[in-house]
Amino acid sequence: MVIMLEQKPSEKRIKVIVPIPMDEAGVASRAEQLPSDFVRPGFKPEFVAVPWGAALGDSYHDTLLMDWTVFQAGIKAEDEGYAGVLIDTVSDSGMRALRSRLNIPVVGPGEAAFAAAMMLGKKFTVLTMWPEWFPLYEKTLTEYGWWERVASLRSIDTRPDVTELLAGKEEVIFEKLKAEATLAIEEDGADVIVLGSTTMHQSAQYLDANLPIPVLNPGQVAYKFLETLIELGLTHSKKAFPAPEVPKDDDIRKGWY
């Protein structure tokens, strides 16, 4: 499912890959994290959900599926004319594999938001919906080598809805998130909060207004970083992410697209 607006000839298209298969309404809810007045003139994000794969990202089973299906969905982004790829999950699923295959910049909200948090403070807490998502952060934080800057991982122990997000549950969920973030500040020493999922974007403004420290909305942080990379003409190092000598694009995409 793809959500996009009419393209202007000079626009730089960004492929935003949703790692969970969902219908048009679900994709539209995810796309709301980048309202039109947030997007710089000349850029055009297009939200595209994977056609099959994980349901909740709550297990190593789903982690593998998210890596694979996001990689599948992004493998032809350069050929499709996109200027960059944004992965719509803090797990950064498939990010490094896509950097290996593509020359256009590929950005993940986890890496971007964690890096921003370290610039804005000394210790950050990842605040998320339920502890089943902790392994996603443990994987990336270990890979990036950033544990020394992590105050804690905290959750409100509430099963997420990755399609409808927080709609209709704001009054309860927002207060739970505020209470847990307050504990992160007072007990863990956090001086920055990173929301643990792009599906939590509806709570960002409330938390930022009601907490004494910065609250990072990872999808927006990553998107703005990607816009900046494109404007600067920068992309990832091919020494760090070397291209395969024998690409397998057709085999990778076979049977689903």
Image (spheres, rainbow, N blue to C red):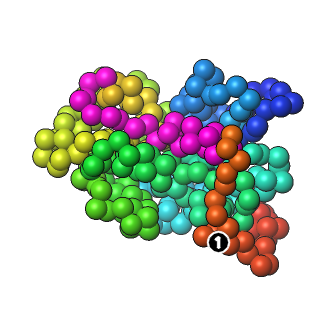
Q: Mark yes or no: residue 148 visible.
A: yes
Say left or right for 70 vs 203.
Answer: right
Q: Position of residue 40 (x, y in %)?
A: 65, 28
Decide whether the magenta segment is chiefly helix, strand or loop. helix
Report the residue at 53% width, 31% height from top.
33
At 62% from the left and 40% from the top, the residue drawn is 228
From the viewer's perspective, tell me whether residue 114 is left or right of residue 193: right
Q: Residue at x 49, y 49 (%)?
A: 112
Q: Position of residue 41 (x, y in %)?
A: 70, 25
Residue occupying image coordinates x 44% and y 68%? 143
Corner quadrant of residue 127:
top left
Query: Is the C terminus in the top left, top right, bottom left or bottom right quadrant?
Result: bottom right
Q: Quadrant of the N terminus?
A: top right
Pinpoint residue 177: horizontal percent, then vertical percent.
Answer: 27, 35
Mark 1 element type: loop
**Furthest residue to the bottom?**
245
> How many numbered circles are shown?
1
Pointer 1 local density, CA inside 10 Å: few below 14, some 14–19, many at least 20:
few
Residue 139 in view in this figure? no
Which quarter of the picture shows residue 168? top left
Task: Report the magenta residues as a range.
Answer: 209-230
Question: Can you tell which quarter of the image residue 145 is in?
Answer: bottom left
- Amino acid identity at mark 1: Lys
Which one is in front, 51 or 97?
97
Residue under numbered circle 1: 239
Query: Is residue 34 rendered magenta in the image?
Result: no
Which residue of the protein is positioned furthest toward the left in this rendering?
Answer: 187
Classify 41 as above or below 114: above
Q: Is residue 35 left or right of residue 151?
A: right
The residue sitting at the top extreme is 37
Residue 192 spot, x, y in % from top left: 30, 41
